[in-house]
Amino acid sequence: ITAVLLIPLSLWLALSLAGLPETSYEAFLAWIRQSLHYHLLLAFLLISAQHALLGLGSILDDYVQGPFINRFSQAAVKLGLLGVLVTAASAIYLLLETN
C-alpha cells in the first residue's frame, strides 16, 4: 500500500518542484506555504518513513541472525527513522515560521 501511495506523491513532488519559476529560497518558501503543498509533503514524508520501515524490517528479518541482534537492529531502524521524521518536520515547521 505504501508503494502504491508513493507513486502519485513522488510524481507530484517531482513535477511540483520542477515547475517552480526559480530555484531561490523565497520561491521554495512561497511553494511550501501553500496548504496543499504543505500537507502533501507531510504525507509524502510519513508514507516514505513507513515504507522504509517495512522494507528495512524485511531485510533485517531475512539477513540478521539471532533474536537479540534482530530486535536490536529493528529498534535502531525505528529510532533512526523517528529521528529523520522529527528532523524533517522540525525543518518544515521552522521554514514556515521564518519571515
Image (cartoon, helix red, strand yellow):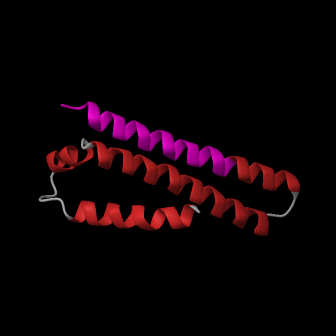
- Residue 78 located within the stretch drawn in magenta: yes
92 relative to 74, above or below: above
Residue 77 position within the rendered picture, expressed as x and y whole percent measured from the top left: 65, 51
- Residue 20 located within the stretch drawn in magenta: no
Quarter in which the N terminus is drawn: bottom right
Could you say which is closer to the camera, residue 31 or residue 85?
31
Residue 44 position within the rendered picture, expressed as x and y whole percent measured from the top left: 44, 54
Quarter in which the C terminus is drawn: top left
Residue 21 position within the rendered picture, expressed as x and y whole percent measured from the top left: 12, 59
Magenta region, main secondary structure: helix
Residue at 65% in and 47% down: 78
Residue at 26% in and 61% down: 16
Left or right of 96: which side holds 66? right
Residue farthest along the left direction in this orientation: 21
71 relative to 20, above or below: above
Q: Quadrant of residue 97?
A: top left
Residue 52 position within the rendered picture, expressed as x and y whole percent measured from the top left: 58, 59
Q: How many marks?
A: 0
Could you say which is closer to the camera, residue 55 or residue 34?
34
Residue at 37% in and 45% down: 39
Left or right of 55: which side holds 28? left
Residue at 87% in and 55% down: 67
Q: Quadrant of residue 55?
A: bottom right
78 relative to 70, above or below: above
Magenta segment: 76-99
Left or right of 37: which side holds 79? right
Left or right of 14: which side holds 58? right
